Amino acid sequence: MATNFPASLDTLTNPSATDTLDSPPHDEQHADANDAIEALQAKVGVDGSAVTTSIDYQLNTGYRYHSTVYFTSSGSFTKASYPWLRAIKASVVGAGGGGGTRTTGAGSGGAGGSTSIKFITDIAGLSASETVTVGAGGSGNAAGTGNAVGADGTDSSFAGVVGAGGNGAEVLGVSGGLAQSGSGGDIQILGADGHNGGGLTADDAGGNGGSSHWGGGGRGGRASASPQDGLNANSYGGGGGGCHDDGASGDGGDGIVVLELFA
């Protein structure tokens, strides 16, 4: 009989120990088995098959998600640890800026870090040990510091993909920190600018820290009490909150590098 595979499974008859060569016919059994083997080989496909219905073609022309590696601190990505690796989706998030302080009135918030995302298929072009840099959040200021800016968040990077750190809060005009654009990605997602402090009087609230692609910044100090601190960022890359009336300002959140690995 001709094989039914791959449309359906074959039902092949096994000979018993007492069967003669013509019951069932020996030549027909060999032909049936050969047809089934050839159909199975065609379905699987040879190495580098160009037959679009073969399993080999389907496995090797697309990418299959395998696992994710998270870097919350700087380190290195060792390519030999993933011998099956064919592509990486890299999401690189810069650190947030620190909040600002003012002696009287409202400090402004730091900017959120920006995110760069790239789908990397040139695995051979990566170094054997690729450096991963995770940006550090910009620090705010201690209570009683007076009129002071927040520190800038620093950049995160992987294989030429850079997530920019957000600027710390400014003092002049109680302006919030400005988000910066990353580079090297297929897309860049800008963090949010820090919120401006409410003003220069004792009734004004501190500005909130800018959000990143990963979540919000720290809340600014409220005007309900004096002094009141701005809060640290709530997320990777979020900006720190500005203070109210000479309180402390919040720190920006550290960056993160997320590598989604595909076979």
Image (cartoon, grey):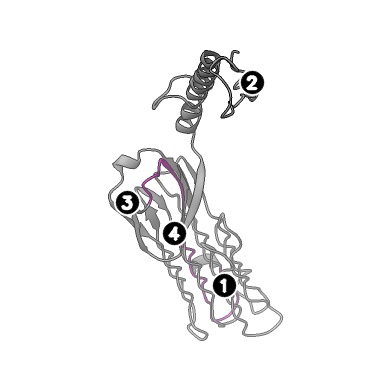
Could you tell me which residue is drawn at 60 percent across and 77 percent down? 105
| Image mark for residue 242 | 1
Front residue (pair 94, 77): 77
Q: Which residues are magenta?
A: 82-108
Disc 3 crowd, CA 10 A, few/some/many (<14, 14-19, 20+): few
Q: Which amino acid type is marked by label 2?
A: Ala
Q: CA distance from mark 1 to mark 3?
A: 45 Å
Q: Is 117 within the magenta?
A: no
Considering only order in the chain, which callout, 1 or 4, is on the residue closer to the N terminus? 4
Q: Which amino acid type is marked by label 1?
A: Gly
| Image mark for residue 80 | 3
Could you tell me which residue is drawn at 59 percent across and 63 percent down? 195
Disc 1 crowd, CA 10 A, few/some/many (<14, 14-19, 20+): many
Q: Which residue is mark 2?
A: 7
Q: Main secondary structure of the magenta part?
A: loop
Considering only order in the chain, which callout, 2 or 1, is on the residue closer to the N terminus? 2
Front residue (pair 33, 135): 33
